[in-house]
Amino acid sequence: MQAILDDTSVAILETYDSNISESPYAILHFHEKVTANSLKYRGIHPLVAAGSHDQNLAALVDRAIRALPPSSPSISEQDDGTTKEEFSVPTLFGRKKPDFVSVTRGPGMFNCLSVGLNVAKGLAVGWQVPLVGVHHMQAHALTPRLVHALQSRGSPVREPAFPFFSLLVSGGHTLLVRSEGLTEHSTLAETSDVAIGDALDKMARCILPNHVLGASEEIMYGRLLEDFAFPNGEEHRLYVAPGTRAEEVSRKESSWGWALAAPLAETRSGYKSKSMEFSFSGLGSAVKRICDAKGESMTNAERMDLAREAMRVAFEHLASRVVLAFEKARSVLVKNDASNDHLVVSGGVASNKFLRTVYVRLCLGAA
């Protein structure tokens, strides 16, 4: 179960220890979510989100229980010649009882987390099964291994193999993590101010025309920003990665007279240029100043250019820290270990196609 922010989600997952070539290693029997409606607030409202969890979590759990796989009894013959049905696993209304209940324990909004935790505790006590608290960011890092398990056949080997890097990019978090095992994760870099997803949402509120914001049926404005910047969905393919670090951090003045500085590139001492941290508040403030100065006179063409440039600067900043981590891993941590070239990008922002393009051309070019 997940109740972190505005999404209420419940799933039923079953795994198998099977070496049969056509047998799946894992099956997702149920997975549904309900998102709180905070449109009128143009952002997640804590009370609305908590109320949505209260309203929807029990119904989702009820549907999930009905989706549990049936428990097949074994038939045994008794001494008197009669037969008896026996279940080899605990049952719940004729269905397999879950072996444990897992729930997100944080990070997230306290009021939201408490709804999920309280329901999960009640189910664990009622069913007399263990309760497993899951760290939100750890789950993001391990999601690709879950997807591989759902898609694989016959082999218990999971991909990506440990160790690997994870870039976790969402509305609340920006982390670069090195994963050694299921519960062994070390943070290599994190944001010193705001998360990348939060920064994109705030920049979108400044850049996007009011009619675009008003017509939106969601509050994740970062996705709207991408759609507005690349209306045909393919323009991001024209991106050319910088050839040098100096080119990457240099300001690129637009035809409209403004330029955006790369985060941490122009600090007084200069040492922040290669520090293992992320920063997006300065970029967001620069975008807001441009929008405030232009006001209603800013054309859609200029807004589109500003959206593209803001995302380019933000994504190159993210990628630069990944490149630094790769370089350090090769020279210091585990030299010549090819497994350290694996990078998982997860979280809501990972769906951004422009972000993927920047990573493929900048990170792989440096690999």
Image (tube, helix red, strand yellow):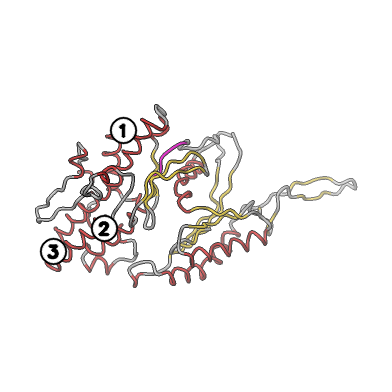
- Measured in 3D between alpha carbons, the distance from the residue under mark 2 to the one under mark 1, in whole angstroms, is 30 Å
Q: Report the disc number at residue 367.
A: 1
> What is the secondary structure assignment of the residue under circle 2?
helix
Q: Report the disc number at residue 289.
A: none
The residue pinned by badge 2 equals 225
Amino acid type, callout 2: Leu
Percent position of residue 333, x then y: 41, 33
**In-image side of 211 versus 42 (left or right):** left
The residue pinned by badge 3 equals 298
Q: Which is closer to the viewer, label 3 or label 1?
A: 1
Quick one: 183 or 236, which is closer to the camera?
183
Q: Residue at x 20, y 49 (%)?
A: 266
Determine if residue 235 is in view: no
Amino acid type, callout 1: Ala
Quick one: 207 or 262, which is closer to the camera?
262
Does label 2 or label 3 sit earlier along the sequence? 2
The region drawn magenta spans 163-167
